[in-house]
Image (spheres, rainbow, N blue to C red):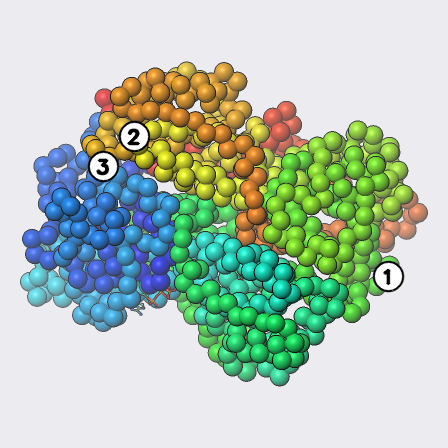
Amino acid sequence: MSNGKKMKVAVLTSGGDSAGMNAVVRAVVKTAIIKGCETWIVREGYEGLVRGNSEGHRHTNSVAEKGHTSPRVKGTESQETEGFVHNLRFGDGELLKDGTGDHPGGRTLKGRYIVRVGWDDVRGWFSEGGTLIGTARSVAFRTREGRLTGAHNMIKEGIDALVVCGGDGSLTGADVFRAEWPGLVNELHNEGKITDEQATKHAHLKIVGLVGSIDNDMSMTDLTIGAPTALHRICESIDNINSTAYSHSRAFVLEVMGRHCGWLALMAAVSCGADFVFIPENPPDADKWADEMCTMIQSHRDIGKRKTIVIVAEGALDSKLQPIRAEQVKDILSERLGLDTRVTTLGHTQRGGRPCAFDRILPTLQGIEAVEALLDATPDTPSYMIGVRENKITRVPLMEAVKMTREVAQAISEKDFEKAMSLRDPEFRESLQGFFATSRLENEPRLPHHLRMRVAIMHIGAPAGGMNAATRAIVRYCIRQGHKPFAIHNGFVGLLDDNVHQLSWLGVDNWTTRGGSELGTNRKLPDVDLGAVAAKFQQYNYHALIMIGGFEAFSSLQILEQGRKHYPAFNIPMVHLPATISNNVPMTEFSLGSDTSLNALVDACDAIKQSASASRNRVFVVETQGGKCGYIATMGALATGACIVYTPERGIDLDMLRNDVKFLKRRYALDAKGKNEGRLVIRNEVSSDVYTTEVITKMFKEEGGALFDSRSASLGHTLQGGIPSPTDRTRAVRLSLKCMNFVEKHHEQLLKQQSRSKQAPPESAAIITVQGTSVEWVPVQDMVEHADMKNRRGKKAWWEGHRELVEALVGRPQILAKG
Ligand code: ATP
């Protein structure tokens, strides 16, 4: 992280609360301090800005006011360190965290809405749901008078930059505030409420927005902060309901949040394999939907399905814009189909709870970007909203995003549903298509006979969350199109043993929620006996192969593609869908299973951290899997706030360990007295043969002396996770349907070849990858160049720079620079 000019930055959370808001506050506060800024939080959203601090509660402990040397941007190391140490804690974090605002020692937040906070005040905020600094819907701030008071309160504290985390309303408020700001300053100046100097210094307001909303209803960003956690909560509930629905052969109608946006409902439907879904963007025909729903659900029941799940978004409408209510759906299912039907309204349980891994990582990266955007801001730049596209943090003009978001509601109210869909991100439409493809039973296959294929599906390597969901989606899609899906059990060894069987629509029904591998996996590559493998391909007359797995699947694809020269049976489209918790497949930023694994790590580390700080100061060295790829360790460290991470890419040496011990000692010495602190160190299991987890733990224990103790924990196979995360399930559906489109396209092209012996082009053996903002196909021949075959990982890792973020967010450079 580079340094920037000094600002006084305040952060507030506004509108409905969402998981991840605390991670935003933490990231903004820490990044701003690193950049040499002073940091504030505003309690209770805009309402706190309007209320400000009552007399006598103005802060006097800013660096400048205390007579310290300011932590200059490009100052010497010791100046930076001094600034860092000064900004360590102001003691208000505990008040905010204990929820009462009152402290036994007499400190109180009463009458203080704009509160100075330091580095340690936001420690440990990661794992808390909701927002610790409070949120509100402020009527006063909607008025110019209220905003004038808000501006005055900010100027009194010297604050010149504001980060707002909230929904579209809050971001609209932010834009209005910034647009009005020069006028507000003028008015305050004319009324003599601020000095000439203040008027000059505060001529412009720097403002940036982050979208905190569980609905994922903001345009120009793929995800809003809190939406992934809300989806987790919904899926947990539905997974629990599934078993009781099955037991009693019942139907359940679930109402989920989403007034103008069906994202939660749709993703829950895809993740949980629901039978029907109602969302505002895709309203069914008002006169036909009841019939259509009954026909669909009856068709599922006719083939023996015992349970029925229908998901209704809070704001679901029909084509005449009449609301569709869960109770209404229930009555229809009970009366027309005679199903024992229950309604479950999930309500506020969807909002709360511990943030999932993504709602820790995304807000952290976005919080960092928000501070960067503030530092870059000039009077001529627009206010930005920080968004995300696939795996890239973006800056988009705030008002443009708000305008586009409003247009969705407008389009729905004008019955322009096509426009409403087009204003959502591309994933939304693909997910809807994915839902239809995996939930609808057709009377007639969609493809003509000559285009129908026999599709082989195989799991290779270690199990990973989402493998089964992907297989289910492929099977369902195949049946809908008229293809025949075949499971090859236990990889290539299974194929040679004829461990093959055709999969059915109902047979894969519950597979979305199942961890592990329903097909069974094996690490053996096809060169175990390539000729025999080719003979089996021929015997079973496969037209396409889909391999779901990690590095072995990629290696297998390479072998099969090269084998085309000798074995005509491999002249078929063949794809690899990356699925591995290690996320070590080259060129793709995500593999199925890596999100499930990160969540398993976060769950375990939250519990470990709790135990680590329960009795005394303790450093826990947590060992993770991941092969020779440090992805899980690094992203896990970012998601849990670990202070050190060891990866195979970087290795471990003595100098490093010496600095790590120095860092830990200094850090513990800076801690508040009388308070136990637990800290995490994450070590990939093959980071070093010599400096093992045991050695490092003992070293820390020895060196920690009276300051801190050390223990270790190995997460081992628990990292494969139990039930796959909703992200892995939805990603599985989306990517596997793209795989099917790919093999269909290449199959059709092969059919057009005139000669009897078809020659599949190299690009028809490819890996599906997520790269930056798009999904890309990479022919296996091209992929080889990007692979480090010896270490079984990509030559480049997009996440490698995140290790520096892990270190930056624990203040390591500043603490080590302290003489
Ligand atoms: P959610 O998506 O959870 O509803 P939101 O941010 O959209 O969150 P709102 O209640 O619409 O929630 O807005 C939050 C606050 O933002 C309002 O209480 C108000 O103080 C402020 N705000 C909203 N719109 C405006 C506006 N046009 N001008 C000034 N302030 C506004």
Circle 1: residue type: His
Task: Tell me which corner region of the image, top left, top right, bottom left or bottom right, holds residue 135.
Answer: bottom left
Instruction: Give neighbour class at mark 3: few <14, some 14-19, many 20+ (Cα, 10 Å).
Output: many
Query: Would residue 678 be visible to someone looking at this image?
Result: yes
Which residue is label 1 attached to? Answer: 449
The residue lying furthest to the right in this view is 756
**Residue 359 place in picture, x, y as percent:** 43, 49
Residue positioned 79% across, 37% down in the render: 494
Instruction: Give neighbour class at mark 2: few <14, some 14-19, many 20+ (Cα, 10 Å).
Output: some
CA–CA distance between discs 1 and 3?
Answer: 70 Å
Position of 715 with respect to 455 (left or right) is left
Which residue is label 3 attached to? Answer: 88
Which residue is label 2 attached to? Answer: 616
Instruction: Give neighbour class at mark 1: few <14, some 14-19, many 20+ (Cα, 10 Å).
Output: few
Ligand 1 shown in quarter: bottom left
Q: Earlier in the sequence, mark 1 or mark 3?
A: 3
Disc 2 is placed on an element classified as loop
